[in-house]
Amino acid sequence: MTDPQSSLSQALDALGTMHPPAPDARIVSLVPSITELLCELGLAPQIVGRTGFCIHPKALVAGIPKVGGTKDVNLDKIRRVAPTHVIVNIDENEKPTADLLAGFVPHVVVTHPLAPADNLDLARLMGAIFGVEAAAERWCAAFERELAALRALPPGPPRTVLYCIWQDPWMSVSGDTYIAAMLAELGWRVPELGAARYPVFSWSERLVNGLDAVLLSTEPYRFTQVHADALEKQISIPVLLVDGEMMSWYGSRALAGVRYLRELRAMLEGS
């Protein structure tokens, strides 16, 4: 049996706001990876709105109304579906939007996972609020096993890798992002490119000389193998195309993401 005091603490969101149990909630999710997690936990019938980027799992989300994007949220559409809860994320959604939502939605649940292990708190938060604690605990047990298996691997050499999320301008990630924390599970670090969490950078000989590899993400910019091959010829160090969903989607996708890290290490070691 779940400890009542434990359930109480698990219902605190990223801003420390307490959300009481609401098993009959009407949910709008403005976070694609959390929409997927809610479906994983059996809550798809209670999701009354999603963004156009909430594409997984395809069969379940197809019938859920779209309420805009992660940045360009349509408040009128959200009003029409009358949610009791809206789920937002500090990185993906705009604070002014969250503030406006708080004016007519009873509960705005704020999330902000920064490392793979934070997925445990995220799943338990969803479980505690929406009455699916057992499903959340099953998912957490599977995730903990996968993360432990990754961490049990013999350590590889430390590497500095540049993780690119955009071009024109070129953009990367800083060390305090979820993506950097995923890479850190392999003993890899990202270079310091400025104070921004998603810094703009310019290519230089000095930058390239400090790198072991470049990773081109398939999202949000749609890098392809053609981009990777062309860049590798220019800079003469390994350039790998990586699955952006596996690297940046927390929630239920993180289970496969942790497995993917082992593949990524093998990819670089074989390059």
Image (spheres, grey):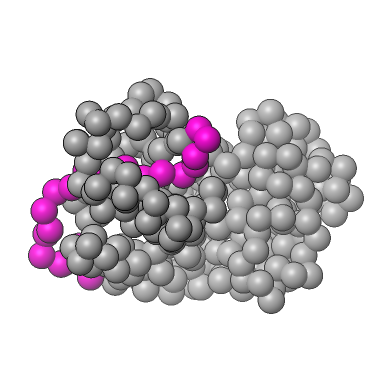
User: Magenta span has 261?
Assistant: no
Count of marks overlaid on the render = 0
Q: Nearer the viewer, residue 81 or 229?
A: 229
Q: Nearer the viewer, residue 230 or 264?
A: 230
Q: Is residue 178 left or right of residue 77?
A: left
Range covered by the magenta-colored residues: 147-169
Image quarter where the C terminus lies is bottom left
Q: Nearer the viewer, residue 196 or 121?
A: 196
Residue at position x 78%, y 51% from top? Answer: 67
Residue at position x 38%, y 23% from top? Answer: 195
Classify 229 as above or below 38.
above
Residue at position x 54%, y 49% from top? Answer: 220
Classify 190 as above or below 35.
above
Q: Tell me residue 209's x, y (percent).
A: 19, 36
Q: Is residue 73 visible?
A: yes
Q: Tell me residue 215's x, y (percent).
A: 35, 51
Q: Quadrant of residue 89?
A: top right
Q: Tell me residue 94's x, y (percent).
A: 64, 34
Q: Is residue 265 visible?
A: no
Q: Tell me residue 243's x, y (percent).
A: 44, 61
Image quarter where the N terminus lies is bottom left
**Which residue is the extreme one toward the top?**
195
